Amino acid sequence: MRREALAAPGEAGAGENASKCRNRPLVASEIVALVVQKYGGTSVGDPERIKAVADHIARTRRAGDDVVVTVSAMGKSTDDLIRLAQEVSHTPNVREMDMLLTAGERISMALVSMAVNDLGVPAVSFTGSQAGIVTDTQHGRARIVEVKGDRIREAVADGKVAIVAGFQGVSTAKEIVTLGRGASDLTALALAHVLGADACEIYTDVEGVYTADPRIVPNARKLARVSLDEMLEMAATGGRVLMLRSVEFARKYGVRIHVRSSFTWAPGTWVEEASEMESMEQAIISGVTHDTSEAKVTIEQVPDQPGVAGKLFRALADAGCNVDMIVQNVSTEGHTDISFTLPKDDLSSAHEVMQRVLGAVGAKQYRSDLDVGRVSLIGAGMKSHPGVAATMFETLAREGINIEMISTSTIRISCVVAEADVERAVQALHDEFKLGQV
Ligand code: ASP
Ligand code: MG
């Protein structure tokens, strides 16, 4: 039944939540679980890995579940293809770039399909276009507008495993496009949603979502569950396990995600709506994240008048600068300082904007600082527990770490500190909030 009742809204579009149709009472003959499994680049990095993945797919299928698979390109092959393009062209044409990069996922989908077929389980691969993943026309970062999925449904109804190339689609102008770096997650979640899958399993090289980056905090703990809201904050503040846009998509449509390892196959972390989690389990703090990919810009002596911030940030937005935290100081003598963070990659565009608009808005000068990092505490429980921010600031103070900027949401507190202090801050906070203990 799940395969019939499938309207397919896109990333941006509103629409009925197709995955909710699993709530309709089922008759016994209809109860077949459908699982979407996504395998990242390291999971399919070489022939041995591909055979191990094929074996897991075949076992899942033999256990009676319907299986739809999404794959990333093998290992670092997307990076290799980008390098290749740069060797033949200074400014590779965006259309041809997408043609090139989509080839990476095409290779892995065909190889995985061959390996699954060899195990006696029928499988068939599809490009994003064949799977009916329709997008807007922005090459390199297209957004999904619709997932048709007819051929996927037919393949599954025929008893086959459908293997879909991640990270790609076909635009409304019939061009082949990519969805942005890391977007195979998004392909998998979009398929899980429109196919009404019971869960979307994201297989990667880590065992799940941790209380902190285990490379920095040796006693970081794997979380059994985390809410989609918390995951969104984690992905936005440096948690590298899931792509931010894919978490936004999952949250919007309530897709349950199971993040797990294709190296150990151990149960990983369930990412799902908070209402599905027992409130007993809700910790005050779920994790500490960090991010050193952003820079800080401070504009000095901005006239304290209506319209100035609007002009500045409009110009930055028009230049494609992805501004993140913004802090405006208390004004003295009709002037104020404004600081903001943005990805280091966007800094050169920001420089151009500053040179153009600073005089126009009457600001004095600006500085940029690359040696900053952001440390964030995330936890749904902080909504109802006063004192979390105070404890965070006291902990950083005890370590002699100066806080340069602060921002909060209802379930997150972030501090910008010197980049050299980031690891120590993460360790101290992880200890202070006892995140290593169950
Ligand atoms: N292969 C693409 C990338 O490296 C998509 C993905 O891995 O999700 O960005
Ligand atoms: Mg990847």
Image: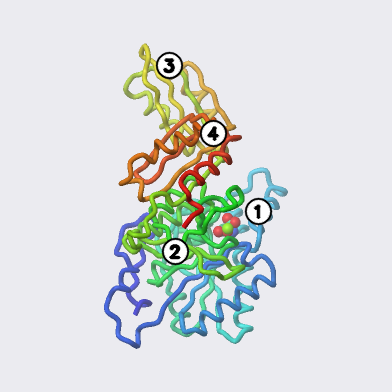
Counting residues from the start of the chain, the first of labels 2 and 4 encountered is 2
Q: Which residue is mark 1?
A: 79
Q: Amino acid at mark 3?
A: Gly
Note whether residue 349 is visible. no
- Quick one: which residue is furthest to the left in this view? 25
Q: Which residue is mark 3?
A: 362
Counting residues from the start of the chain, the first of labels 3 and 4 encountered is 3
Q: Which residue is mark 2?
A: 270
Q: Is mark 1 within 8 Å of ligand 1?
A: yes
Counting residues from the start of the chain, the first of labels 3 and 2 encountered is 2
Q: Relative to 11, say whether 387 is above or below.
A: above
x%, y% of residue 408?
Answer: 39, 39
Q: Residue at x 63, y 67 (%)?
A: 44
Alpha carbon separation for disc pair 3 and 4: 39 Å
Nearer to us of marks 3 and 2 is 2
Q: Relative to 151, say whether 215 is above or below.
A: above
Answer with left or right where residue 287 lies relative to residue 252: right
Q: Nearer the viewer, residue 285 or 230?
A: 285
- Quick one: which residue is furthest to the top in this view? 333
Alpha carbon separation for disc pair 1 and 3: 43 Å
Q: Residue at x 65, y 52 (%)?
A: 82
Q: Residues within 10 Å of mark 3 (few under 14, many from 20)?
A: few
Q: Residue at x 52, y 61 (%)?
A: 208
Q: Which residue is mark 4?
A: 399
Alpha carbon separation for disc pair 3 and 2: 51 Å
Counting residues from the start of the chain, the first of labels 2 and 1 encountered is 1
Answer with left or right where residue 242 lies relative to residue 383: right
x%, y% of residue 235?
Answer: 47, 50
